[in-house]
Amino acid sequence: MAYLALYRVWRPGRFDEVVGQEQTVTALRNAVKTGQLSHAYLFSGPRGTGKTSIAKILAKAVNCENVVEGEPCNQCSTCRDINNSNFMDVIEIDAASNRGIDEIRDLRARVRILPAQGKKKVYIIDEVHMLTTEAFNALLKTLEEPPDSVIFILATTEAQKIPATILSRCQNYNFRRLTLAEISQRLQQVADSNDIDLEEAARDLIARRANGGMRDALSLLDQVHSYKGHKITGQDVMSVLGLVDENFMARLINAVLTHEIAEVVGLLNQALVEGKEALQIVREASLYIRDLMFYRLLGEDVLMSYVSETGKKYLKQQKDLVSPSDLMKALKVLMGAGEKLKFSEGQKFLLEMSFMEITALFAPHEEAKKAPPERKAAAAPEPKERKDALEGTWNKILAGVKEVKIPTHALLCQGKLLGARGDSLYIGFKKGYKFHKERLEENPNREIVEGVVKEIFGKNLDIQFIFLDDNQYNDIIVKRAIEYFGEDIVEIKD
């Protein structure tokens, strides 16, 4: 007998074998039991969460010769034929490759033919969102007045692409991602049934990488089992799947946060020499930073995507080194790098530059923390010197903006540079210049100012336009500006 992949062997054959999706399973089983079946269903949700499997179970249940309490028997000739894909009245259509109007017109013609073997003719249309607009319109005609002997089950991973006219004619069921506990339990069950010694660390690692999809989890287990045999450790999973060790990633991110450039480059080279893919390194780093950000915000209650329970000790050490906003910026850089790496030949160069960019994000914060308070106070300029420095910088900004666009300069010159704090630059306006402030906050003008500021400061700064003399409008931010820059810099007049 030909080898079957684990996800096919363990595909549920009855409603009570489905993992998760309790509400959907209960509703469909009751519909079969009471005979209150709809003519059309829409199953939507992430891949590998059971949409097609439940569609086939429903197809068996409505045609089964010995259905009991809404469950197919899986013993009669009808159930066996459906399981073997030999049943004439259960028709599966892949909309990705049969997406045109001609295919749907052919379907409409065949719909009128009575079932040949069973009680109901069931059409399962997978990836239905791939149909063309014309094909959807043709399908709509059939859904409006379907024969009593036909049931449509539409499945999709992108429900937002389904026309509202189709949605309104279907019973809609949303499939959720499975929890780590649900996936881990099924993985252990599969491992026990196949005499696989699956280490807990390996099981949990596969469950996390499956991203809520049972099919992906079983496929990953199948892949590792094919290579490593009947004893699988956590290290085996990382080796086979090309994953980056959690401890290694903690060291890499720690070097990024502490601005240890030499160590960052050395660790990246080590990973590449060991055969890790640049894209995989970026993905793993993104997941780690995501976990660090949410751990920083939510504490112990956060659901981790990458870091294990034992790995939380690294997050505890790192969470106070960074702000959530900087972590968000780092995530954006890495996600952008991930997209570029898919189509780039200079993998190593792009990987190194991406990590240099996120390392630079954290450098000012670290330097500020490491600088002794006495030295910082001693180096601080006097109020008059600060004013002169601000005035010189402000003139540079105004001149740079004027070169780009004179109308934007006319708006900006009515303001006053207050100073910079971290990654924010504050520009104040009196209340009478509300029009100027609001126009500058619009994207075209803001982008011009931000571009000039970047050239002057050598980095991106968030421009904050604030009112100087309207306490009700922006009292908090003005107070913060005074606190940061001193009353001699921020003048509030009645």
Image (tube, grey):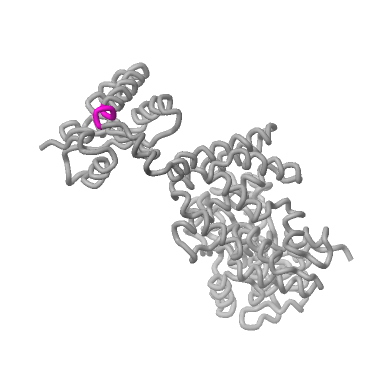
- 286 vs 425, left or right, is right
The percent position of residue 315, horizontal first and vertical second, equals 54, 57
Residue 231 in picture, x, y percent from top left: 81, 67
Say which of 237 and 162 sits in front: 237
Instruction: Tell me how many marks there are.
Output: 0
Residue drawn at x 56%, y 71% as measured from the top left: 37
For the view shown, which residue lies furthest in the left direction? 494
At 35% from the left edge and 27% from the top edge, which residue is drawn?
449
Q: Quadrant of residue 359?
A: top right
When the figure is inspected, residue 160 is found, relative to residue 229, above or below; the finding is above
Image quadrant where residue 102 sits = top right
Q: Measured from the top left, where is residue 336 in percent x and y? A: 56, 39
Q: Quadrant of the N terminus?
A: bottom right
Q: Main secondary structure of the magenta part?
A: helix
Residue 296 belongs to the span the image colors magenta: no
Q: Residue at x 72, y 56 (%)?
A: 238
Residue found 84% across the figure and 64% down from its top: 229
Could one spot residue 465 in this view of the protein?
A: yes
x and y, in percent, of residue 221 in the image: 74, 62
Dividing the picture into quadrants, the one containing residue 378 is top left
Q: Is residue 233 left or right of residue 157?
A: right
467 relative to 436, above or below:
below
Q: Which residues are magenta?
A: 383-387
Please indicate, yes or no, whether residue 154 appears anywhere in the rendered image.
no
Side of 100 where 485 appears, left or right: left
Which residue in the rendered view is the most extreme toward the top? 403
